[in-house]
Image: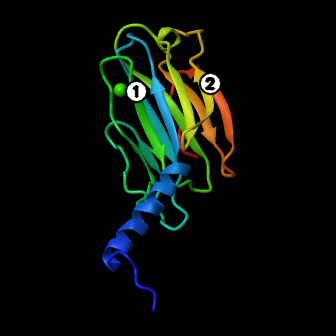
């Protein structure tokens, strides 16, 4: 019989921790930063419905931040709502559902507009930088949504990168 150098509960804890670290290593992180103005940009992620539940999808934003438990739908969460310039705001996606996601930024409050915000969105898988988006520099007055990208059902990313008048919606 093999004797473990640690107790069974300790072993189970170590196992769970290791699995969670592996998951974090594959997690996608979407990081939004910006300049001084406007003071409050917001990160939004539209998560499709789960494969098993009959839900209608999930809208992650400051008032509905998702779950930081990788086992719980929507398998994604927003860490903070920065309201006083610069960011960062980070949305982490632990597990990807095999349907389309949409990510966008909303100019919620503050002077100026998106095109002059200096906003940048970076997408990482683990610690590897996969994509960098700079906000378009042409602004239509009153347009407050920067639709940045989709994550497709197969995991590839489709660039959108447009400033528009309304928020994207779930399919
Ligand atoms: Ca914010």
Residue 162 falls left or right of residue 88: right
In the rendered image, which residue does mark 2 sit on?
161
Residue 33 rendering spot, x and y as whole percentages: 45, 22
Please name the residue shown 30% across and 18% down the image. Answer: 84
Question: The N terminus is located in which quarter?
Answer: bottom left
Depth check, front residue: 93 or 152 = 93
Secondary structure state at the residue bearing disc 1? loop
- Quadrant of res 158: top right
Please name the residue shown 40% across and 31% down the image. Answer: 89
Please name the residue shown 39% across and 13% down the image. Answer: 38
- Residue 25 is tagged as none
Please name the residue shown 50% across and 40% down the image. Answer: 29
Image vertical order of residue 53 relative to residue 154, above or below? below
Establish whether ligand 1 lies closer than 8 Å to the Cβ of label 1: no
In the rendered image, which residue does mark 1 sit on?
88
Q: Is residue 29 visible?
A: yes
């Amino acid at each position: 019989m093999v004797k473990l150098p640690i107790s069974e509960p300790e072993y189970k804890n170590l196992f769970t921790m290791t699995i969670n670290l592996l998951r974090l290593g594959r997690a996608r992180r979407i990081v939004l930063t910006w300049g001084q103005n406007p003071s409050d940009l917001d990160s939004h992620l539209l998560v499709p419905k789960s494969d098993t539940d009959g839900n209608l999808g999930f809208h992650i934003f400051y008032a509905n931040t998702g779950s930081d438990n990788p086992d719980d739908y929507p398998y994604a969460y927003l860490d903070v709502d920065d309201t006083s310039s610069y960011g960062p705001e980070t949305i982490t996606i632990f597990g990807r559902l095999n349907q389309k996601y949409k990510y966008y930024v909303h100019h919620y409050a503050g002077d100026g507009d998106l095109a002059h915000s200096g906003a940048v969105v970076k997408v990482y898988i683990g610690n590897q930088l996969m994509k960098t988006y700079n906000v378009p520099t042409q602004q239509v007055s009153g347009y407050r949504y920067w639709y940045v990208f989709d994550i497709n059902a197969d995991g590839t990313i489709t660039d959108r990168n447009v400033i528009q008048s309304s928020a994207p919606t779930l399919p």
